[in-house]
Structures are given as structure tokens and as C-alpha cells.
Image (cartoon, grey):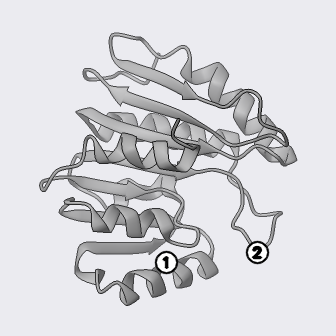
Amino acid sequence: MDKVLAFSKKLLKEVIDKNSVVVDATAGNGNDTLFLAKTSAKKVYAFDIQELAIENTTRLIEEAELTDKCEIVLDSHFEFDKYIDDTIRAVVFNLGYLPNADHDITTLAETTLATIKKFLLHLEIGGRIVIVVYWGHENGKVEKEALLNELQNLDQKEAEVLVYQFINQKNNAPFIIAIEKRKEISCEK
């Protein structure tokens, strides 16, 4: 079986083509941004609120000589529509905190949910949002419950929602929530 991070990449790669606009909603150390930049996608956007994350991601993209394809933005992922006019094919989130940085700065349930709903409105039909949920910290537990409670109620005619989780792993192992848009969505419900 694919491990969580390998499966998240598989889910993304299945829907990305040469016309795709894709987003790393939580740039972090830049690994997902680099992965997306190495796909056939035409444009990659990466967002983070921490300067260290932007520096790490920029360095990784520069070393790979993929800067022409990427726009790395120091801003909240909630503000993505200020930077992206195109419809979006794929989005990846790695929730939690930036490794080797301030663990008090984390993604938060309210902002994450609002951003996901907003992304659903801008996502192409057939596009995917892949969320890797790291929940081994206090905010992570709250975020996990909020996401599962809210996303299980998306209309199955509008979006399919998958949870991919190894249920016998210790220490709050990360898991995936993936959403595939099936038709235009009204997030006002």
C-alpha cells in the first residue's frame, strides 16, 4: 500500500496535465511545490504566511531551475484569489506546523475550512484538493475533527470525498482527505 505522502502525490498527478494551474496551499519547506513544478502543470502557485517557508521553498525551486513555472507568495492561502485568475486543477495542503520552526504557528480549522470551500468554487470539474492532515498537536486535533465533520456533508453529486488512513499506526499518524469536484458547487449551503 502507498504511504500517505506517496498516495497524496499519486492523487494529484492523476489529474494534472500541461494546461493545469495547481496550488501548494501550505508551502512549508517546498517539497510539494517542487513536486508540482516537476509535473506537466503549466503554472504552480505556493502560499505560506511564514517568511522562513517562503525562503525554503524559493531556494528549492531555484536549485531545481523551475522559477519560470512557479509563483511563491507570502500570504494566507485564503487570499489565493487575489493572485490566481485561472481555474485551478489541483490543490495540496499539508496541515499543521512548519517542521523545525515555531510550533505555535499552525494551520487553523476555521481558516482551512473557509479556504477549502473557496477553492472548491475555483476548482475545475474533475479537479482535486488533497489535504494531508497532521493532527499530533492540539490545534491539529481540532482541525481534524472540524474537517471530517464538515467535509463528510458535501453533496456527493457535487464532490466525492475520500479519507485514506492507516488505522493501526501509532502517534496520531497523518492521513489524507481528498476531494474531487464532480460538478459546480454552491458552498453557501
Residue identified by numbered label 2: 101
The three-letter code of the residue at mark 1 reads Thr
Q: How many labels sit on residues?
A: 2
Residue 44 in the image: state x and y as whole percent: 30, 64
* Element carrying mark 2: loop
Vertical placement of residue 180 versus 24, above or below: above
Vertical placement of residue 41 versus 60, above or below: above
Q: Earlier in the sequence, mark 2 or mark 1?
A: 1
* Element carrying mark 1: helix
Residue 76 in the image: state x and y as whole percent: 54, 61
Residue identified by numbered label 1: 57
The three-letter code of the residue at mark 2 reads Ala
Between the C-alphas of marks 2 and 1, the distance is 14 Å
Q: Residue furthest left?
A: 19
- Looking at this view, is 111 or 127 the one in front? 127
Quarter of the image for residue 70 reads bottom left
Task: Identify the residue at horizontal 79%, vertical 36% (top origin).
Answer: 142
Task: Identify the residue at horizontal 54%, vertical 50% (top origin).
Answer: 5
